[in-house]
């Protein structure tokens, strides 16, 4: 039925077999004092080694000229940070990331909502709809990239085949500076909309049907019911979806890297900030500089999260 | 570092069927309902088109793949592309690696996060709230920020190109502690009290009382973690240079060139790489939908 994975751990000796018979929680205190930390320890250990350590090391490294070539690093103060502020590629890639976020967030929210509302109405084909809308989300990014590079292919790709079939001119989707980010955004919408769709679907299922029936009796049409009932009741979900989506979009890297063969696209038009972190660290081997940019990216994520949290809580308070 | 021996029990522990969501009662199909169904189906078919195109391409002889104008159906369907890809052997190795690593990540996440969640939910100790706060703060750190220093650190630890090096950093997902803690918090005190009175220690209570009551949430966390680990790209990509240790996303991503301009083979490899999770999804759709929703909403 449930959760066998941990069962094997039971043999790890239980140091406190003593009974708390009849004693108030107070008396059990000293025993619990040891049990708690012991139980939290394994996770805390990994947390320290694989999160706190690299986080601290990264910050320290950003003040050095550390390199992957193995040359002894020396302390360079704020040099990396100063260089970063003056490096047009930093701002270019940051802009690419923001642009991508602006391009993908609205469709990823709106299309997900549309899909969820349609699924809610079309009960009989629900299984097929859930499969079709959600299954792309389960594809590994490399599979998604393989399929879409093939679809965007000039000449014999599916999309251009459809375009030319309709008498339209062909577009070199991934090879043109003006369309490469758009093409990657389109792929991303197809790939990840299923997640937001599931969140909306769950929220819709929480709305009692009687609400709609009452509105129907009052003569409200489908569109009116959607505008006046569904949308307002989904406010909270929409806020969560937008928040999760923006942070997810800001983390663009995988598909942009794979769909441009790691090149960043023509004239780096599709190299996001994480792509530049990656290139600085692993191509140019400059870990110090790359760490400084990592922290810039970190600051952006924190700023966006805090801003959204603030907007979100303010809205809730006034509601 | 030795490879872990076959780890038992994959993540998708069958959850008890969730209470069927009461379907909205509809006596007749209204015109708007019919319109909704039709547009939903059109959209769904459109959404499947890329997958269908990939599948159809994979059954074409290479010469047919580059025909202009494009043809949807293969004229002479063949499994030659699959034979070529499978003969190469990479994809089987990657599928195995992905299975081992995702299972490792999932089992460790479930065990460690359940232990920690119980500690925060049901024990008290000095510094508990501070530690909890530290873990909360950890949620805010995007893994991408850590990639470069983490790689540096892995070289130091000699864990580059090992299963553990790929898996362990992925276990640090503090958000799972909160999901579990919130669930544990809701378990009535009486159940645990009774067990404590019987002389059971905390670990015993966790294993024999709390966990058996937490099936659905453990399944949700497990499914979510497994899917994420299976599809994770950036860290496994950085942490492995040896093709024999690569996961499906990394292997397919880095040797894209190996299939050259053999589009049928590329698509066959893509189909093989996609198949496992899609198949699991078809079998356990309800549980996966619920798992992703529960864990995804935090």
Image: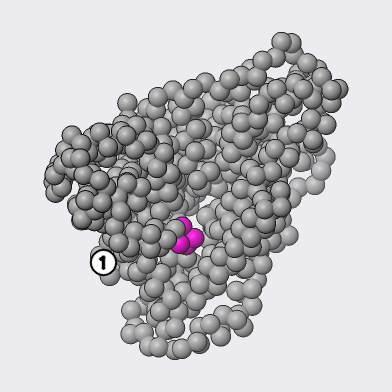
Q: Residues within 10 Å of mark 1 (few under 14, many from 20)?
A: few
Q: Position of residue B30 (x, y in %)?
A: 78, 16
> Residue at the location (83% across, 40% down)?
A167
> Front-most of A192 and A295?
A295
Q: Quadrant of the N terminus of chain B?
A: bottom left
Residue at the right extreme of this rendering: A219
Q: Secondary structure at mark 1?
A: helix
Quadrant housing residue A116:
top right
Instruction: Tell me how the rendering is colored.
Output: one colour
Q: Is residue A225 left or right of residue A243?
A: right
Q: Is residue A285 above or below residue A171?
A: below
> Front-most of A271 and B66?
A271
- Asked if residue B139 is among those painted magenta in the image, a careful observer would answer yes
> Residue at the location (41% across, 32% down)?
B216
Quadrant housing residue A120:
top right
Whether residue B263 can be seen here? no
* Marked residue chain, label 1: B
Q: Position of residue A265 (x, y in %)?
A: 62, 61
> Front-most of A292 and B213?
B213
What secondary structure do most residues of the magenta stretch adopt? helix
Q: Position of residue A55 (x, y in %)?
A: 41, 69
Quadrant housing residue B72:
top right
State how many labels appear. 1
Residue at the top extreme of this rendering: B27
Q: Position of residue B144 (x, y in %)?
A: 47, 62
> Front-most of A295 and A47?
A47
- Asked if residue A227 is among those painted magenta in the image, a careful observer would answer no
> Residue at the location (62% across, 68% down)?
A94
What is the magenta range?
Answer: B137-141
Q: Is residue B132 above or below residue A144?
A: below
Q: Mark 1 highlights which residue?
A: B157
């Amino acid at each position: 039925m449930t959760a066998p994975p941990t069962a094997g751990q039971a043999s790890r000796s239980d140091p406190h077999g003593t009974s708390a018979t009849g004693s108030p929680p107070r008396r059990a205190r000293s025993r619990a004092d040891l049990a708690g930390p012991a139980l939290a320890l394994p996770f805390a250990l990994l947390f320290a080694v694989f999160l706190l350590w690299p986080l601290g090391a990264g910050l320290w490294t950003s003040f050095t000229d550390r390199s992957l070539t193995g040359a002894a690093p020396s302390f360079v103060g704020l040099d990396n940070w100063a260089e970063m502020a003056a490096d047009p590629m930093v701002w270019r890639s940051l802009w690419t990331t923001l642009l991508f976020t602006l391009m993908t967030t609205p469709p990823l929210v709106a299309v997900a909502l549309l899909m969820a509302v349609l699924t809610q109405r079309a009960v009989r084909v629900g299984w097929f709809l859930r499969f079709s809308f959600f299954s792309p989300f389960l594809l590994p990014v490399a599979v998604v990239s393989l399929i879409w590079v093939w679809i965007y292919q000039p000449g014999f790709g599916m999309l251009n085949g459809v375009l030319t079939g309709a008498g339209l001119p062909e577009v070199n989707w991934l090879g043109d500076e003006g369309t490469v980010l758009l093409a990657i955004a389109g792929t991303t919408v197809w790939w990840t909309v299923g997640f937001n769709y599931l969140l909306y679907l769950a929220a819709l299922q929480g709305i009692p049907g009687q609400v709609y029936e009452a509105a129907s009796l009052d003569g409200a049409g489908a569109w009116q019911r959607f505008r006046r009932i569904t949308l307002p009741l989904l406010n909270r979900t929409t806020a969560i979806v937008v928040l999760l989506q923006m942070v997810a979009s800001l983390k663009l890297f995988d598909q942009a890297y794979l769909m441009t063969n790691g090149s960043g696209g023509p004239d780096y038009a599709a190299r996001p900030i994480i792509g530049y972190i990656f290139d600085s660290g692993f191509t140019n081997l400059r870990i110090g500089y790359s760490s400084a940019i990592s922290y810039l990216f970190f600051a952006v994520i924190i700023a966006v999260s805090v801003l959204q949290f603030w907007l979100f809580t303010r809205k809730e308070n006034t509601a | 570092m030795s490879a872990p021996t076959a780890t038992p029990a994959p993540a998708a522990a069958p959850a008890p069927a969730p209470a069927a969501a009461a379907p909205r009662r509809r006596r007749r199909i209204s015109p708007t309902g019919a319109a909704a169904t039709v547009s939903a189906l059109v959209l769904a078919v459109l959404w499947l088109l890329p997958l269908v195109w990939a599948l159809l391409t994979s059954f074409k002889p290479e010469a047919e793949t580059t025909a202009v104008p494009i043809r949807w159906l293969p004229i002479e369907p063949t499994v030659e592309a699959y034979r070529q890809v499978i003969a190469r052997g990479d994809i089987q190795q990657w599928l195995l690696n992905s299975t081992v690593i995702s299972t490792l990540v999932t089992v460790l996440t479930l065990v460690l996060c359940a232990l920690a969640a119980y500690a925060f939910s049901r024990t008290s100790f000095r510094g508990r709230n501070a530690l909890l706060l530290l873990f909360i703060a950890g949620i805010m750190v995007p893994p991408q920020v850590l990639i470069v220093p983490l790689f540096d650190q892995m070289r130091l630890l000699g864990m580059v190109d090992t299963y553990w090096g790929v898996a362990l950093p992925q276990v640090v997902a503090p958000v799972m502690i909160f999901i579990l803690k919130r669930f544990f918090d809701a378990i009535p005190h009486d159940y645990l009290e009774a067990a404590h009175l019987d002389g059971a220690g905390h670990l015993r209570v966790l294993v024999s009382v709390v966990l058996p009551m937490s099936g659905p949430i453990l399944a949700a966390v497990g499914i979510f973690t497994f899917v994420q680990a299976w599809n994770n790209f950036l860290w496994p990509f950085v942490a492995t240079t040896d093709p024999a240790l690569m996961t499906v996303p990394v292997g397919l991503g880095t040797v894209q060139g190996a299939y050259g301009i053999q589009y049928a083979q590329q698509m066959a490899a893509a189909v093989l790489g996609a198949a496992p999770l899609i198949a699991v999804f078809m079998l356990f759709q309800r549980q996966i939908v619920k798992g992703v929703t529960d864990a995804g909403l935090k």
